[in-house]
Amino acid sequence: MTNRVNVLGVGISVLNLRTALAAIAGAVGARRKGYICVTGVHGVMEAQDDAALKKILNDAFLCTPDGMPMVWAGKLAGHRDMRRVYGPDLMLDICAWSETSGCKHFFYGGADGVAELLAQKLKAKFPKLAVVGCYTPPFRALTADEEAQLQAQVRAARPDILWVGLSTPKQEKFMAEFLPKLDATLMIGVGAAFDFHSGRVKQAPRWMQRSGLEWFYRLCSEPRRLAKRYCRNNPLFLLKFLAQLTGLKKYTLP
């Protein structure tokens, strides 16, 4: 377990892409089961009103600093080597490592056909990548028959990493529930990475990602879907984090 920074009661792992990959490689090699939450302001703010989600984030094998505010919080706490561990970048680094490690991958999530398209695009980029399955879930809870089908498919494939491309908090709750049910070593929730790497949605320019402005790019791209999330969560996060920094409000980690 890595060190964690307390951000409004959510423990964000002190990581950069290199150390995150090393931790993941170690878990895959040891077949240590766990799930990884790629967490930014949205996840932290969702957890403020959802105790179950907060527990899921804090129980994760890794809770990576997906957004720049998480990185800034880490640096304020003295962790100078902490960097953004962005879901789409983490996916590419793990796929590159997998070409020589033999790590096997399964893709769960996305709209119809997205998981398969993602697998095709990644295989084109990483020819030696071992993709052992894809599954597109319905936009509702799985029925008992669908759950049994998924379990059988994953049992036959035995992936080292099962990538989950759902929205927060749906993907985090899915991983916490299904980790003990599925024959996979690690589950990693990467949300929009499925859409980005399949080519369905364009990513923000790198300079906007590095400066903490990716949210603004995504808001402009999908205003109806994301306006409520960003226009409410971002100012409220800033107020709550300032209260934590100044000691006006105490947040504890388990």
Image (cartoon, rainbow, N blue to C red):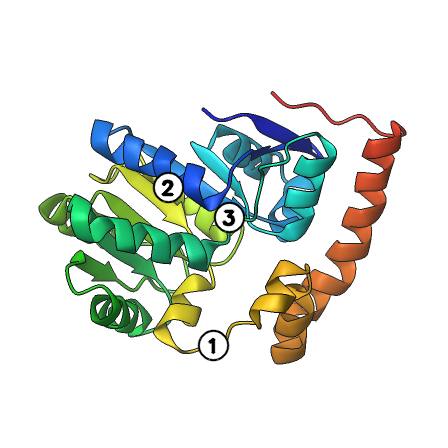
Residue 185, x across and y down, in percent: 25, 37
Q: Residues within 10 Å of mark 3 (few under 14, many from 20)?
A: many
126, above or below 40, in the image: below
Residue at (49%, 77%) from the top-left corner? 202
Element assignment for label 2: helix
The residue lying toward the viewer, choosing from 171 and 200, is 200
Residue 164 in view here: no
- Residue 34 position in % (x across, y down): 35, 33
User: Which residue corresponds to mark 2?
Assistant: 21
Q: Which residue is mark 1?
A: 201
Percent of width and height locating residue 86? 50, 53
Q: Secondary structure at mark 1?
A: loop
Residue at horizontal 15%, vertical 46%? 102
Q: Amino acid at mark 2?
A: Leu
**Figure quadrant of the N terminus:** top left
| Residue neighbourhood size for the residue with mark 1, other residues' Cα within 10 Å, grouped as few (<14), some (14–19), many (≥20) | some
| Side of 5 relative to 193 (left or right) | right
- Looking at marks 2 and 1 on the same chain, the residue that comes earlier in the sequence is marked by 2
Label 3 SS: loop
Relative horizontal placement of residue 96, taking residue 61 as reference (left or right): left
- Residue marked by disc 3: 85
Q: Earlier in the sequence, mark 3 or mark 2?
A: 2
Q: Residue furthest left?
A: 156
Which of these two is toward me, 163 or 155? 163
Give how far across and how far down residue 244 sits, in percent: 81, 33
Q: Which residue lies at the image location 32% right of the left edge and 50% below the top edge?
A: 94
User: Residues under labels 2 and 1: Cα distance?
Assistant: 25 Å
User: Which dot, 1 or 3, sits closer to the camera?
Assistant: 3
Q: Is residue 54 left or right of residue 101?
A: right
